[in-house]
Structure formats: C-alpha cells, structure tokens
Amino acid sequence: MDESTAVPAIDAIRLVKRFGDRTVLDDITLTVPQGELFGLLGPSGSGKTTLIKLITGIDRADAGKVELFGEPMPQLKMLQTFGYMAQSDALYQELTGKENMAFYGSLYGLAGKVLASRIQSAALLVNLTDHLDKPASAYSGGMKRRLSLAIALLHEPQLLVLDEPTVGIDPVLRKTIWNELRALTQKGVTIIVTTHVMDEAEKCDRLGLIRDGKLIALNTPEAIIEHAGVHTIEEAFIALGSSKEDHT
Amino acid sequence: MRIRALVVRIIRQFVRDKRTLALLFLAPLLILSLTKLVFDGRTVSPEIGLIGPASALADKLEEQNASITVFDSMDDADKALHSGDLDAIIQIRDGKADITLEGSDPSVSRSTQLVMQKALQSSAQDDLAPSVHYLYGGPDMASFDSFGPVLIGFFSFFFVFLLAGVSFLRERTSGTLERLLATPIRRSEIVLGYLAGFGIFTLIQASLIAWFSVQVLGMSMAGHIVNMLLINLLLSLTALTLGTLLSSFASSEFQIIQFIPIIIVPQAFFSGLFNLDAMNPVLQKLSYIMPLYYGADAMRGIMVRGEGIPDIQLDIYVLAGLSILFALLNVTALKKHRRM
Ligand SMILES: Nc1ncnc2c1ncn2[C@@H]1O[C@H](COP(=O)(O)OP(=O)(O)OP(=O)(O)O)[C@@H](O)[C@H]1O
Ligand SMILES: [Mg+2]
C-alpha cells in the first residue's frame, strides 16, 4: 500500500463541542480509513449533525482536532475534497433542479461538457432525470433529498459526508442508492453517513453509536451485536444505551 | 468563475421573481410620477377679490394668472374669504394696497403673495422696479425640480437596501449559506458575487429612473446624465452593501423591515428633502454620516446646478468609500459562519 491510502480519510481526535454551558459532543475520537462506508447511528438530538459539522469544518470544536486525509481542518482547499449533503435541503426554490446542480457544480470548479455530463449521471443515479427542468419549489420532499444527494456527488469527491441522505426516499430507490454508495467505496471513496434506520446501519462497514454526545460503541455491526449479546443492531443500541445509563 | 456562477444564479432567481422585478423597476417610477402630479400640477391661479374700481391693477393681476372678482364692499369680500371662495382680498386705500390673505395653507399664501407682488410692481410703473435674475433654475422651476433629484437618490437607495437585505437573509435562513460555505468558495467571492449580481439590476434600475425622470417627467436636467447614472449606481452599491451587512443582524424578513424607520427614514430627513437650516447646527452635522446625504447632494448638484465631476468628487469618494467599507465588513461578518 502506498502512503496516501494509509492516511485515514477522517481522523477526529478528542472532539468537544458546547452550546452555551451544554456539552453536546463529549470527547469523541474517531478514525475512518479510506474506502470505508462508516455509519453514525444515534437518536434524535444525540449530536450526529454537530459531529458532521465539526468534521467538515463548518462548525468549530471547543477542543480537539480534525484531520481529513492528513490535513488539519478547517482549511479552505480541503473543502474541495468532500461532497456534503446537509440534513436540511439547501436548494434555491426558484431554480430548476438542473440549475441548482449547475450552480453548486461550478462552485466546485466544474464547467462546460464535464459539468453537463456529471449532472446527467448524478441525476440518473437518484432517478431525477425526468424532473431536472422543474423548479425545486415543485419538488416533493423526497425529490429534494435526492437532488441534494446528487449535488453532493457532482464533483466526484474522495469523501462523501451525508447527513440522513435517505429520509423520505422509498425503499426501492433507497436500495439503489445504497448499492451505488457501496460501489463508490469500492472505487476508494470514503463515505460517512448518519442514519436513524437500523437496516441501513447494518449495511455499513463500521458503525459509531452516539448517545447524548458520547460515542458508546465503535465497531462493525456484527461485533457490536455480539458484544451486546443480542440479535439486532436495534437491540444492541437499546442495551448499550441503558447499560451506560446504569453506570451514571 | 465562482463569482460568475453566483451572478448567473442571482440573475436567474431575479428573472423568475416577477413581483420583485416590478418592485425594483416600476415602483420608483410610479412614486416619482405621483410626486410629480402632486407638486407640479397646473400653475396655481389664486382667487383674488378686489374692492373698488382699480381696473389697471385687475388687468395686471389677470396677466399673472390670477382670477379676479370685483366686490363693492369689504363685507361681501370678507364673506367670500371666509367661505373659502377667495385666497386673498386687495383693497386700495389712499393709493396703498391693503392685502388680507386667507392664510391657512402657507404654500397657497406664498404663491398668492408672489402673484400680487408681481402685479403691483409692474403697475407701479416705477423705473426702480427690480429685474430679477436666477443663478440656477429659473422662474419656471417647480419645487419638484428641486427635490426630485433627492427623491431619485432615495428610491435607488431604499429599494436596493430592502431587496439586498432580504435576499441575503434568505440565503442564511434557508440553509443555502451554510451549504455555500461548505464549498471552496471564498467569503470575498460571495460578497463580490452579490455585488456584481445585484449591481447589474441596480444599474438597470438607475438607468431607467434617470431616463424616466428626465425624458418622461421632464425634470430639469442641467448637468450630464452619465454623472447622474454614476451617482445613482454608487448610491445603490452603498445600499446593497449596507443592506447585506445589516441583514446579518436580522433573523427574519420582519426584522429587515424594522431597519426602515431606523436606517432609511432618518436619512430621508437629512438628505435635503426638507430644509435643515432651522435645525440645531450640531444635529445638522448628523447628515455627514448618512450615505443618502452625499448622494442627494450630488444628484441635486448635477440636475439643478449642472455640476460636473470636479464639483461632486467629494460625494463620489465618500459613496465609493462607504461601499468598500461595508463590503469589507460583509466579508468579516461572514466569519461568523466560517472562519476561513
Ligand atoms: N446551534 C445550536 N445552538 C444550540 N444548541 C444546538 C445547536 N445545534 C444543535 N444544538 C443541540 O445539540 C444537540 C445535538 O444536535 P444535533 O443536531 O447534532 O442532533 P442530531 O443527532 O443530528 O439529531 P437529529 O437526528 O434529530 O438530526 C441537540 O440537543 C441540539 O439541541
Ligand atoms: Mg441531525
């Protein structure tokens, strides 16, 4: 292996984030090697989005540090290396799907024929090809989600940071998307994805379980299930969460 | 490249939003037309009552566009004055004119007085009657010609301020700003993109207002229209940068509206719509911190007094300086959302 694949895609060390006097993320250490499909699982309000924002450098940690591909964050040039899909769709309602994609695409330096062909292939992937000329305001919730995902894929980044990418997307399309994500990791793309959905969690290479801002487990889905002595991720999550509470 | 993407996006958004386009382009024209109608209607013809036989004076008054009613007694004339049929009564006693004005509307009193003065002067057949010359403007200049230039500046400022503020706020509240800041765009590129994108529309707006007020409304235009455009554009850029800057202190569209009485209205008072000579001199100095003061001063200079670049260069420097200052502050304010 050459050195570049040896460097982890994400290296987060002892991250702490507070809002006022509330500690939302408490001492999170997390390493994601290149080419891994990593899942962040946790209940609502546990701190998944906050962690994602620290990793991408959108928000700043109160303590600890983040490195992407060995480069300390935040750094302007590193913003080119990842594709980001926020939890809330950041779309321009007056613009069509295609125009939204073209806008974000050109911010990543895409232009001309390359941009046009990337728009087509990303739209195909999320099954939006027939709706590209509609304004985003006329999209359904799931369609907006898919458009946001397509935008994140547009510049073929080395790292994909997806905050609940499949909310509001039907099971069939969801499966297609997960297959595509899997295919991307085989090409060496690293993916970090947050989710509430247990069957999605089981498809990840490794999982991080977050509860109340603490990382309560970090392992492959199978190892987590085995360690908790249960049969499903769902049960493991409940078991690990409550055992943690028993100690405190 | 990224700036261009932002400009293209802003143009597309604008073109889709017909109502906002109308507000930007048509609303100023509508309000200017209305103001013109109100302040610049027919030449006022005062109703003057004349007591006793003084036909020479009556002719002179009619030459000055007054309509004359001759009364036999003061009582009848007095009744007409009370009932509002007359604006003034002239009674000639011992060769002296004794004038009673209705007086409830100062502007009517003034124009009535002016008409009577002119008539009396010319009927005096006196070699000493003064002949009046105007340095700027002329006897036909209406008050609209004098404060119209200020209004033009005001509208360029007001509408652009509002639109820029709301647009930038929306970018923040809709989450697109955060998404934008997760791309490799520089903070300065965002500000420049906004300046350029909105700049195009403000340039169109400025040209439209300039053309309309001179060609259609027939406002007096002593100077060069290019200078007028320049000032209008600078004023809009100041409004644009100030609007986006202040929008980072607002959390909703309604809070942008709250800036109107705080930021916009005081500027209207200090910009020359009203004569400030009667104001406390210390308070008068407040106008020096108001962008609109400089814009209005230059506009009036160009349109009324025909001033060229050398006469208005201070205004140009101040407006350009304020725009640059606000733009830089904008770049800094974006640090709140992303440090790099
Ligand atoms: N800007 C903020 N100011 C104050 N508190 C915040 C802010 N953003 C998040 N929080 C708090 O931090 C905690 C974690 O929020 P976060 O958005 O990371 O949760 P999450 O795991 O993504 O939840 P969900 O699954 O609902 O998206 C929450 O309790 C939330 O109230
Ligand atoms: Mg979240």
Image: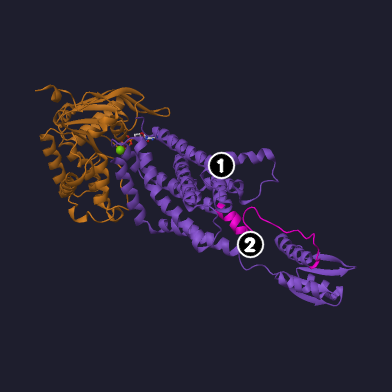
Q: Chain of mark 1?
A: B
Question: Is the CB of mark 1 within 8 Å of ligand 1?
Answer: no
Q: CA distance from mark 2 to mark 1?
A: 31 Å
Which chain is depicted orange?
A: A
- Residue B173: horizontal and vertical position, in percent? 39, 44
Rendered view: B108 above or below B62:
above
Give the amino acid type for the residue marked by disc 2 in the picture: Asp
**Which amino acid lies under the numbered mark 1 shown in the image of this protein?**
Met
Q: Is residue B136 left or right of residue A30?
A: right
Magenta stretch, main secondary structure class: loop
Residue at figure coordinates x 38%, y 49% from the top left: B200
Segment colored magenta: B123-149
Q: Which mark is residue B290?
A: 1
Question: Of label 2 and label 1, which has the lower sequence position?
Answer: 2
Quadrant assignment for the C terminus of chain B: top left
Report the residue marked by disc 2.
Answer: B140
Residue B15 vs B312, above or below: the answer is below
